[in-house]
Image (cartoon, helix red, strand yellow):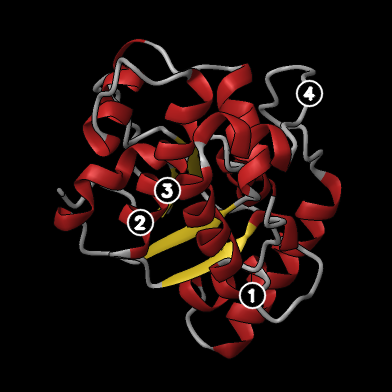
């Protein structure tokens, strides 16, 4: 990565609230792009403090700054993948991360993406939080983590975290939403992907603090 690259890479699965987070950070006065540096189209916006982009995953071995991992409940992510499928170079990039399986249904492929992208993020992440916790003051609150990473000293870290929490309270969580659609149930998911993959999702979700029933 060149010196023009963002200092911080914020990664996840895609459809995990990356656009929402970028908006929150921008509203708080922090220069954060949404797939503005790391993307499969070759576009590059320089001068960013951070880029919130799952597309950074393949480039993390060459990134020298902090890597932050944002998660979202697997039922929401997988449902969103099915509702708004990836396309063109974005689809190619997802297949580069998780592998190409033309025999899989959209739900099955989405489950594989969820697992593969989170595993890739975990391998390099310096910190992790749940998008659902932004601004709510939980011990793993992303606002506090971001303040600690971006702030230079305790006072500045607290100021950044407070600004992010205020912005999170104002920015709609539907930012970058792709329209209405039903959320998959655990029963529908296990019927589609099978017990083996479903149990991997249960374990991964549990590690991030999410609950999936043993269907």
**At 73% from the left edge and 63% from the top edge, which residue is drawn?**
133
**At 74% from the left edge and 70% from the top edge, which residue is drawn?**
162
Which numbered dot is residue 115? 3
- The answer to which image quadrant residue 100 occupies is top left
Q: Secondary structure at mark 3?
A: helix
Q: Secondary structure at mark 1?
A: helix
Which numbered dot is residue 119? 2
Q: Secondary structure at mark 4?
A: loop
- The residue nearer to you, when weighing 42 against 202, is 202
- Alpha carbon separation for disc pair 1 and 4: 32 Å
Q: Earlier in the sequence, mark 2 or mark 4?
A: 2
| x and y percentages locating residue 19 in the rendered image | 59, 36
Q: Provide the residue designation for mark 4.
A: 182
Q: Mark 3 Cα within 10 Å, few/some/many (few <14, many 20+)?
A: some
Question: Is residue 37 shown left or right of residue 108?
Answer: left
- Alpha carbon separation for disc pair 3 and 4: 21 Å
Res 20 seen here: no
Kindly check if marks 2 and 3 are in contact, taking CB atoms under 8 A apart as contact.
yes
Q: Earlier in the sequence, mark 1 or mark 4?
A: 1
Kindly check if marks 1 and 4 are in contact, taking CB atoms under 8 A apart as contact.
no
Q: Foreground mark, 1 or 4?
A: 4
- Alpha carbon separation for disc pair 2 and 3: 6 Å
- The residue nearer to you, when weighing 103 against 152, is 103
| x and y percentages locating residue 80 in the rendered image | 63, 28
Q: Foreground mark, 2 or 1?
A: 2
Q: Earlier in the sequence, mark 3 or mark 4?
A: 3
Q: Provide the residue designation for mark 1.
A: 144
Kindly check if marks 1 and 3 are in contact, taking CB atoms under 8 A apart as contact.
no
- Alpha carbon separation for disc pair 2 and 4: 26 Å
- Alpha carbon separation for disc pair 2 and 1: 23 Å
What residue occupies the far right of the structure in this picture? Answer: 170
């Amino acid at each position: 990565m060149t010196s023009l690259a963002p200092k911080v890479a914020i990664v996840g699965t895609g459809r995990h609230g990356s656009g929402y987070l970028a908006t929150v950070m921008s509203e708080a006065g922090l220069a954060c792009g949404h797939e503005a540096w790391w993307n499969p189209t070759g576009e590059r916006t320089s001068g960013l403090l951070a880029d919130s982009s799952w597309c950074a995953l393949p480039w993390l071995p060459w990134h020298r700054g902090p890597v932050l991992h944002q998660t979202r409940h697997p039922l929401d992510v997988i449902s969103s993948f099915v509702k708004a499928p990836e396309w063109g170079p974005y689809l190619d990039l997802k297949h580069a991360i998780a592998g190409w399986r033309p025999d899989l249904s959209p739900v099955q492929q989405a489950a594989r993406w969820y697992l593969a992208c989170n595993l890739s993020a975990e391998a390099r992440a310096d910190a992790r939080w749940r998008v659902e916790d932004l601004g709510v003051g939980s011990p793993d609150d992303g606002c506090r983590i971001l303040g600690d990473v971006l702030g230079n000293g305790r006072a500045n870290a607290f100021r950044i975290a407070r600004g992010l929490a205020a912005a999170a309270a104002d920015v709609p969580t539907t930012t970058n939403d792709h329209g209405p659609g039903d959320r998959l149930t655990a029963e529908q998911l296990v019927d589609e992907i099978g017990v083996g993959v479903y149990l991997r999702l249960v374990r991964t979700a549990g590690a991030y603090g999410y609950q999936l029933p043993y269907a």
